[in-house]
Each structure stands twice: as C-alpha cells, then as structure tokens.
Image (cartoon, grey):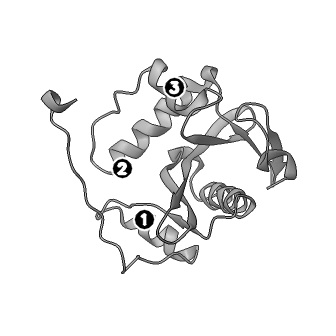
C-alpha cells in the first residue's frame, strides 16, 4: 500500500498497483457497492442487502464513519471491495482489524483482485499497529475458505463466535 493511502482521508486516496486503482468509497459509488454486496449475499444464500444510501454514507463514507471501505477499480469500473474496522482489546492491549466484507465482481474473479484487496488491508493494518486480521466465513462458502487458506489464513481455534440477535422491541 502506498504511503498516501495509509494515512489518507477515506475519500481522497488513490493509487495504482498491477493495473488496479485502489481508493476509498465515495457517496457516488453506492450503486456499484450495492451490486457487489448483492453478489456476496447471493454467494452465501442470503437475501439482497437492504442497504440504503443514508446507511452507506453513515457507516462507510462520512469522515467519521466506523468502517473503511476500499474499492478496487479497473478501467474506471469498480471490480472489488473490502470493508474493515480497527478494534482494540483492553485485556491484551492487542490491536486487530476486523474485515466484514470482501467481494469481487463475478466477471473479474480469478485475476488476483481479492488477494490485492487483502494485501492492501494487511498493509493498512500494519501501519496502524494491528497484530492480526480477522473475519468470518459462511460455513458453506468453500471457494472463500480455499482463497483465505491460499493467503495463509487459518481457522481461529481459540475463539468461538457468538451472536445475540436484538429483537425489534429491544431496539
């Protein structure tokens, strides 16, 4: 990752690597991001995400958004995305990056875009003193599992993910 992207604002940084441009998402990218999110959802047998423009801007685009969303662009077309957030554990003083979504357009798969996006986040994580990247994979997404294993990732045998679903009346 170039130094310009490591510390840059979420919307201005652009750099090229192997014919791909990497930049943070902007409000105008909503339709392309929603399409990539929809492709990811269909891959894991989920419904089309009900993401709104307001949610997109609030969580991914605005200067103080809690998530970062990096796009891979080839020939002026968004071909991939990865979103993440920085976390810190008090008990261990360990800084980590949690990746929430990785998606590469169906037509652009097999060209190293996913690996390039992961490499960009890995470099960002190192620049922000993170010791690990973490993410979840749908148990039946065998292609994703194989992809992450090719990158050198392994299943975290020490942690068990829990989920507490909030009911409508609790919100």
* Mark-to-mark CA distance, 2 and 3: 26 Å
Rendered position, 73 above or below 90: above
- The image shows residue 129 at horizontal and vertical percentages of 69, 64
Residue at 70% from the left image edge and 58% from the top image edge: 128
Query: Which residue does the numbered mark 3 point to in the structure image?
Result: 58
Nearest to N terminus: mark 1 or mark 2:
2
Mark carried by residue 110: none
- The image shows residue 138 at horizontal and vertical percentages of 32, 59
Q: Quadrant of residue 113?
A: bottom right
Which image quarter is the N terminus in? bottom right
Rendered position, 29 above or below 155: above
Residue at 64% from the left image edge and 32% from the top image edge: 25
Between 70 and 19, the one lying in front of the other is 70
Residue at 72% from the left image edge and 31% from the top image edge: 11
Nearest to N terminus: mark 3 or mark 1:
3
Residue 118 as seen in the image, left or right of residue 23: left
């Amino acid at each position: 990752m170039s130094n310009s992207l490591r510390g840059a604002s979420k919307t201005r940084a652009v750099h090229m690597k192997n014919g791909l441009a990497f930049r943070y998402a902007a409000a105008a990218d909503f339709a392309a991001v929603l399409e990539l999110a929809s492709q990811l959802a269909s891959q894991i047998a989920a419904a089309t995400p009900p993401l709104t423009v307001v949610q997109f801007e609030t969580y991914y685009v605005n200067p103080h958004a809690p998530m970062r969303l990096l796009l891979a662009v080839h020939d002026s077309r968004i071909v991939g995305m990865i979103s993440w957030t920085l976390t810190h554990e008090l008990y261990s003083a360990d800084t980590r990056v949690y990746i929430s979504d990785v998606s590469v357009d169906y037509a652009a798969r097999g060209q190293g875009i996913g690996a390039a996006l992961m490499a960009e986040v890995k470099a960002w994580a190192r620049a922000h003193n993170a010791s690990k990247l973490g993410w979840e994979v749908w148990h039946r997404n065998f292609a994703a599992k194989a992809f992450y294993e090719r990158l050198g990732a392994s299943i975290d045998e020490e942690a068990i993910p829990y989920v507490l679903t909030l009911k409508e009346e609790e919100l």
